[in-house]
């Protein structure tokens, strides 16, 4: 059985405590108090003249005779459904049961709190491990993106260098064509001078030396011109495979890809920064 311990303090407020009354309530010989001549708590004799508290009362739980002084408490009786007198002995038993029950409940509560704390700790460890794994994965992605962007940047630089080389070769080609025209003119002049040789005062030896010098110059420049022509032909062949339009298109594609990779890297870095801030908090 369970009942509520009812106590009345100086402010007339009633305090109730749930207790189990099994083993306290006497179910047999409930008339035993009639035989008692002494208070079962303090052993005061009942019926002594002039002593008020010697009046016999009986505890409604153990059904033994008690004086008023030793039965000043009341407990809600589960059978009577209202507060009834209880002797100090039974009251101490109730308090002991209540203390034991409260202690057991407190132990259960503490154990429950410990179990809950352990579960929270396990969940926190799992969460931190997941965060660490995610962060490491993001860092790998960032490193991969940075490496890819570096390769794209190198490709961009190579394309720029190739365009510059082609532009330089075109300029050299223009200069070479100009020089070829000049050499053709000099050859023509030499032929004209050879025709006019009889009318000039050059000696045969001087004229031959002059002709030889000019021919050597023409041959030297012709060899250099042929070398440049060969280089130009090689670069023109390369240009056919990768003309400026293709280079410009590829350059734009590389540039666009670099911008996209940079944007993705920026997002990943921001996400890592947020996770680090969250972990620190």
Image (cartoon, rainbow, N blue to C red):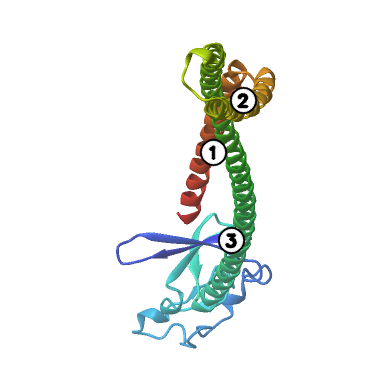
- When asked about the image quadrant of residue 116, the answer is bottom right
Q: Position of residue 120 (x, y in %)?
A: 60, 56
190 above or below 259?
above
Mark 2 or 1, nearer chain start = 2
Q: Quadrant of the N terminus?
A: bottom right
Q: Position of residue 129 (x, y in %)?
A: 64, 55
Mark 1 or 3, nearer chain start = 3
Q: Residue at x 59, y 80 (%)?
A: 35
Q: Which mark is residue 117?
A: 3
Q: In the structure shown, which secondary structural element does the residue marked by tag 3 occupy?
A: helix
Q: Give neighbour class at mark 2: few <14, some 14-19, many 20+ (Cα, 10 Å).
A: some
Q: Which mark is residue 265?
A: 1
Q: Quadrant of the C terminus?
A: bottom left
Alpha-carbon span between mark 3 and mark 2? 93 Å
Q: Give neighbour class at mark 3: few <14, some 14-19, many 20+ (Cα, 10 Å).
A: few
Q: Say which residue label 2 marks.
A: 222
Q: Position of residue 63 (x, y in %)?
A: 58, 72
């Amino acid at each position: 059985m369970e009942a509520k311990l009812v106590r009345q303090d100086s402010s007339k407020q009633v305090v109730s405590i749930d207790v189990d009354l099994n083993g306290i309530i006497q179910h047999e010989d409930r008339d035993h108090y009639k035989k008692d001549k002494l208070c079962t708590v303090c052993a005061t004799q009942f019926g002594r003249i002039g002593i008020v508290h010697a009046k016999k009362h009986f505890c409604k739980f153990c059904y033994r005779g008690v004086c008023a002084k030793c039965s000043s408490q009341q407990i809600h009786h589960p059978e009577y459904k209202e507060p009834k007198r209880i002797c100090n002995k039974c009251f101490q038993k109730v308090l002991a049961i209540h203390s034991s029950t409260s202690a057991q409940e407190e132990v259960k509560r503490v154990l429950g709190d410990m179990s809950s704390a352990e579960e929270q700790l396990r969940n926190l460890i799992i969460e931190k491990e997941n965060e660490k794994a995610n962060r490491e994965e993001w860092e790998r992605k960032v490193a991969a993106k940075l490496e890819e962007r570096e390769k794209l940047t190198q490709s961009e630089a190579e394309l720029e260098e190739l365009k510059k080389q082609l532009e330089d070769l075109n300029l050299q080609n223009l200069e070479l064509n100009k020089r070829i025209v000049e050499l053709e003119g000099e050859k023509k002049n030499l032929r004209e001078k050879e025709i006019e040789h009889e009318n000039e005062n050059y000696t045969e030896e001087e004229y031959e030396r002059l002709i030889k010098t000019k021919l050597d110059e023409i041959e030297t420049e012709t060899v250099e011109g042929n070398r440049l022509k060969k280089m130009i032909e090689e670069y023109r062949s390369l240009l056919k495979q990768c003309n400026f339009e293709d280079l410009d298109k590829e350059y734009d594609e590389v540039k666009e890809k670099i911008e996209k990779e940079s944007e993705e890297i920026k997002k990943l870095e921001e996400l890592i920064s947020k996770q680090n801030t969250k972990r620190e908090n």
